[in-house]
Amino acid sequence: MKIVAIVGSIRKESYNLKLAQYIQNRYQEKIEVEIADIKDLPFYDQDMELNPPATVTAFKTKVKEADAVLWLTPEYNYSIPGVLKNAIDWLSRIDKVMIGKPSWIVGASMGLLGTVRAQQHLRDILFSAGVSSPLLPGNEVYLGLVHEKMDEAGQLTHEPTIQFLDTVVNNFIAWYEKQAK
Ligand code: FNR
């Protein structure tokens, strides 16, 4: 299964990016994860959507060709970061590449709540008409206090979190295969 990971933080030392890389490495025998670059997407502009710049076309093609999308979101002001909403807005228009494409969500933050409010918003957005992405039920991954559970190199060090993630990945694969039938 080919998965495109879309990370809602564009900073170099992002915990969510490190988590994407951790998932990419740890589960490489089971899933192929490619991390999409959303940093160079322009602000969504309806005047550009019929003839978008190459960065937008490449991004949309990557998502279109993937079997599923893994969203990794930080929480900014109780919601998802603007860069992530911007990326979704591009995906939701014209060829609407997200419609019917399975998704799962994880999120990491240094706070206790582990992006719970951002993920609630993200779920609402994924269910909107132009996105309409079937979402892995349950299996909600709120990685709070991430700075205590991940080392500098981006390796998770907190065994219960690792075991939970292992379970969620297996659940996602089983759910995806049921969807694909
Ligand atoms: C935050 N942060 C934050 N954390 C949280 O739990 N709830 C929140 O509402 C916010 N709001 C917020 C706004 C802005 C503008 C910033 C920059 C940060 C903290 C945030 O979760 C933390 O910086 C994460 O480490 C960001 O994710 P990455 O970049 O490490 O992936």
Image: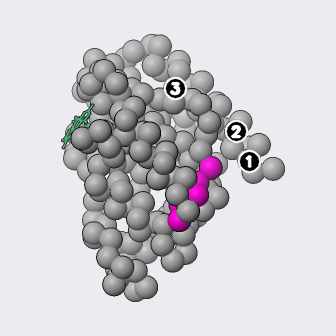
Mark 1 surroundings: few (<14), some (14-19) or many (≥20) residues within 10 A: few
- Tell me which residue sits at (46%, 66%) in the image: 91
| Nearer-the-camera pick, 129 or 161 | 129
| Total marks placed | 3
Identified by mark 1, the residue type is Gln
Give above or below for 35 relative to 105: below
* x then y, percent, for residue 95: 55, 75
Q: Which residue corresponds to mark 2?
A: 175
Magenta residues, start to end: 130-134
Sequence-earlier tag: 3 or 1:
3
In the drawing, does residue 157 fall left or right of residue 176? left
| Nearer-the-camera pick, 89 or 11 | 89
Sequence-earlier tag: 3 or 2:
3
Mark 3–mark 1 Cα distance, whole angstroms, equals 21 Å
Q: Residue 18 is drawn in which quadrant?
A: top left
Identified by mark 2, the residue type is Trp
* x then y, percent, for residue 114: 35, 28
Q: Are marks 2 and 1 in contact (CB under 8 Å)?
A: yes
In the drawing, does residue 127 fall left or right of residue 50? right
Q: Is residue 119 visible?
A: yes
Disc 2 under 8 Å from ligand 1? The reply is no
Identified by mark 3, the residue type is Leu
* Label 2 residue SS: helix
Circle nearer the viewer, 3 or 2: 2
Q: Which residue corresponds to mark 1?
A: 179
Q: Is residue 23 magenta?
A: no
